[in-house]
Structures are given as structure tokens and as C-alpha cells.
Image (spheres, rainbow, N blue to C red):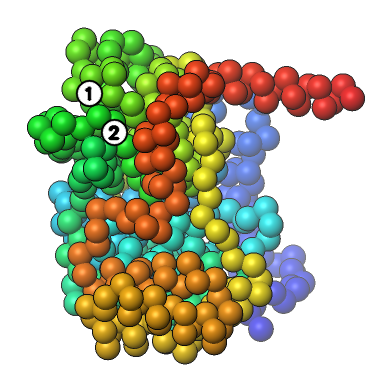
Amino acid sequence: MDDYNKPRTLRSTGPFWFAAVLVLSALCIFASVPRAEAQGNEQNSKRYTSVIQNIFDFIQKRYVEEVDPRVLYEGAMTGMLNALGDPYSGFLPESEMTDLNNTTQGNFGGVGLYITKPVAARPDGRPLYVEVAAPMEDTPGWRAGINPGDLIVEINDEATDALSMEEVLKRLRGTPGVDVRLLIRRGEKLEFPVILTRAIIEVPTVKHEMIGDIGYLKLLTFTPMSVDRTREALEEFKEKNYTSFILDLRNNYGGLLNSAVGVCDLFLEDGVVVSTKSRIASENAVFTARRGTAVPPNIPIVVLINRGSASAAEIVAGALKDRGRAFLVGEKSYGKGSVQQVYPLEKSGFRITIARYYTPSDVNIDKIGIPPDKEVLFPEFSNEEAEKLNTLIAANRIPAFVEANPHAADDTVAAFARELNGEYGINLSLLRRLIRNEQNRTAIAPVYDLEYDVQLQEAVNILRAGNYGRLMQTTKTLRELQNEAVLEDDTALAS
């Protein structure tokens, strides 16, 4: 048993008592500050700063072993920023700042997953596993079929609930060509292993292609190049005489605020795009679109969103919805309505929330998300289906089939899906989608998959049905939806 767990009886004489008095006296000085009567924030800030410095010095001089000052510094910084209770604010040690710089430059060795990790206990009491916010297109994580909301339970047989975000990133990123073993949990029942081989990850910006006479653009993230690449795609669509447009923001985790505003400027004529509000006067701003658009106002627009659409993606979706310029299809978005700034501290740094953003109808969607005008969900697994899928995954039937038949024709795939359906009783359409996902792991994925993407199917149907104008007349701004929700809550309370 450690000594600090044992009760002690102090004697009134001797060197031990003298040392204890010194220590207790020092601690009393430290502890007296919070009990002092408040004399204004500025004075309290000075007091607490002095206390922190005193404790730092005290540990350096009195702790039983010599301590690296950097360890104390990073611990204090981590604790201060975590105390904000804001998952988007935090200390960035040297390794994380390096990763951030690599990501900004567009090249790093990794598996291509955007992840989050709670810093405090979950309300439901579940372990603090790493959660996938979104996979990056055409990366090892995406090709393995990892989805937003999946939990990474283990990395190389090590449970992630006990790892810090820095430790998680160290294990996921690194030398290209090295395998990383993950244990993925999806929902309540489905759990399966995945082996990802690190690759050079080049942060993608956009993908685009025509779907008949419809221009389809998937905006993957908001970088300094997003506006230019989007404009180039729109010019190509114009040359091909596009009559309508689909902007796919699904699994777009966000990025640069200015890029989001610039993309909106391609679709909106004048007016507010987004505003930021902060207690810092210089961070209060209203961003507006310029005169003229790259997309004519007579071109119908459908925007696809899901729970992986966050931050800058929500700025674009919210602006186009509030301004009546697009019809939203898919799932409710993630709900990140805050703006962060990264500040360097020599080789380390920190990120901190400096403002919240508001859509043109003056709504902040933080922790709420943006609802689609037409909800379209992918089929979810029942517990029974999840157990059957676990059995199928454990048997490795689909990867073995794809490896043996790398260029399988559609009829061959359909026949194999029917075979699995007979053996496992799993939905035939789901089986074909799983086979397609496995095929995409070993080849450049198509820009879109109209056969299995039910949300994209609905977007195309809306644009081709000829009732886009009538649908747009039924849409509501986020302010109107929020007011209706408040009214419903008040009515429920009154009853």
C-alpha cells in the first residue's frame, strides 16, 4: 500500500512536525485566496495567476522527485482549457500542432479519419471511446466503410477510453505503409475489426461530375482552394449545359470560415451569409455576398446533409436554406455553431472558441443542428440483423469474394449477394451495398453511387420531377422552425 493511504499520528516535536508545519502553512496561504472576498475579475485574475506561479515554484522545489517544468506547464495549460468544458477548445502540444500544420498543408501520414473524444464523462455513463466524426474521401478509413458515429474501441489492441486525444493521434498517424488495427463498434450490437494501412493523406477539396443534366459537386472540406475548385466545377457544368445542381455536404466536417463564405457567394446575390457574435468586439462581424453569382437564380439547387455535416458545412447549408436558395435533403446536421482560432506558443499552441456564428435568420445551431427539408435515412440494423452481420463479417466472405473477383460483373455480384442472402438471411440490397463498399476499398471510388445512395436518389428525383418550385414554397427558415419549436414546447407545458 502507498504511504499516503496510511493514517499518521503526528508528534508535537521533532523534524517531521516542523516540516509538516511549513508545508501546511504554505498550503494555507495558497488556499486562502479563493476564500478571500471577491474584488473584481481583474484583481481575482492577478491573485489566481500568483497562486498558480507559487504552486508551480513550490512543486519544483518541494516535490519528492525532480519534475520537468514542461510537464507542469503542459498539464496546467491542458487543465485550464479543459476547464472551459468546450470540446473545441484545448491545449495543442507540439505533436498536435505538427499534425495541424501537416493537415493545413495537405500532406500527412494517416488513415483519413476525423475523430472526436469527450473530455468529460458521458451522460449515459458509457466509456470515453473515440468517435468518428467523418471519414475523408478516398482514404484507408473511408474505403474500409467506417461511418460517422462509429466508435473506435481499440487501436492496436489498446482501449481508447484510457487514451488522450494526443495519444490517439500518435497511434493513427505516422509512417505511411504501416498497418493500424482498429476495433469498430457500430450501434449497440455490431462490432468488428478493421486493419487500415497508413497512406499519404492529401486533404481533398471537391469532386464533381454530371448526373445526366444535373451538376453534382461533393464539397469534402473547406480549404483555401475550395472556392476556386468549386468555381471551376461550375464552369465545367455550364459548358455541359446543366439545368440543376446538387451540392453534397455530407460528412463535410467544416474548415475555414472564409472559404464557406466564399462558396456561398457563388450562389447568393448580395445579403447576409453568416454573422459571428462574441464578447470580443473585433470578432463581431457580418459576412455578406457580393453582387453577381456563378450559378444563375433559375438553376434549382438541392443540398445534401447528414450528421457528419458540421461547422463550415452548416454555415453553407444554413445560409442557402435561410435565403431560400436551396432545398435540403438527408439527415439533421451535426450541430457545431462556434468559431475557433488557433494560437501558436513556440512549438505548441492552443485552440479556443472565440465566437458563435448565426445564420441569416439569426439562429445559432450549436448542439441543435440543421434539419433537412426532406428527411431521407439509410436503413438501420435491427439487433437480429446486427448479429447476422457480425457472423458474416467474422466469416470474411465479402472481402474474400472481392479479392478473388476484383473485376466482378454486376450479374456475378448479384448472384453472390443472393447466395449470402440464402445463407445469412440479410437484406439483399444491404448485401449488395456491402459488396460495393468492399469493391471501392481496392479501387478509386466513384464520385457518386446512384444505385445505393438513397439520399442522392431523392435529390435527383426532386430535380427531375418538376415540382421543385412548389417544394421551395413549403420550406421555412431556421428562425421560423425555432419559433415553432418554442411554441410547441410552451403549448405542451400549458397542457
State the residue position of label 1: 295
Horizontal side, residue 192 vs residue 104: left or right:
right
Residue 298 position (above or below residue 135): above
Q: Position of residue 21 (x, y in %)?
A: 64, 57
| Nearest to the observer: residue 201 or residue 241 | 241
Which amino acid is tagged 1? Val
**Other-residue count near label 2 (Cα within 10 Å), few / some / many at <14 / 14–19 / ≥20:** many
State the residue position of label 2: 245
| Nearest to the observer: residue 475 or residue 258 | 475
Q: Does residue 36 appear anywhere in the picture?
A: yes
Residue 271 position (above or below residue 391): above
Residue at the spot x=18%, y=22% of the render? 294
Horizontal side, residue 242 vs residue 67: left or right:
left
Residue at the spot x=54%, y=71% of the render? 427
Q: Position of residue 412 (x, y in %)?
A: 33, 80
Q: Position of residue 246 (x, y in %)?
A: 32, 37
First in sequence: mark 2 or mark 1?
2
Q: Position of residue 477 (x, y in %)?
A: 51, 20
**Other-residue count near label 1 (Cα within 10 Å), few / some / many at <14 / 14–19 / ≥20:** many
| Numbered label tally | 2
Check if mark 2's residue and mark 1's residue have beta carbons within 8 Å. Answer: yes
Q: Quadrant of residue 397?
A: bottom left
Alpha carbon distance from label 2 to label 1: 9 Å
Which amino acid is tagged 2? Phe
Rendered-image quadrant of the C terminus: top right
| Secondary structure of the residue carrying numbered label 2 | strand
Residue at the spot x=36%, y=14% of the render? 272
| Nearest to the observer: residue 439 or residue 181 | 439
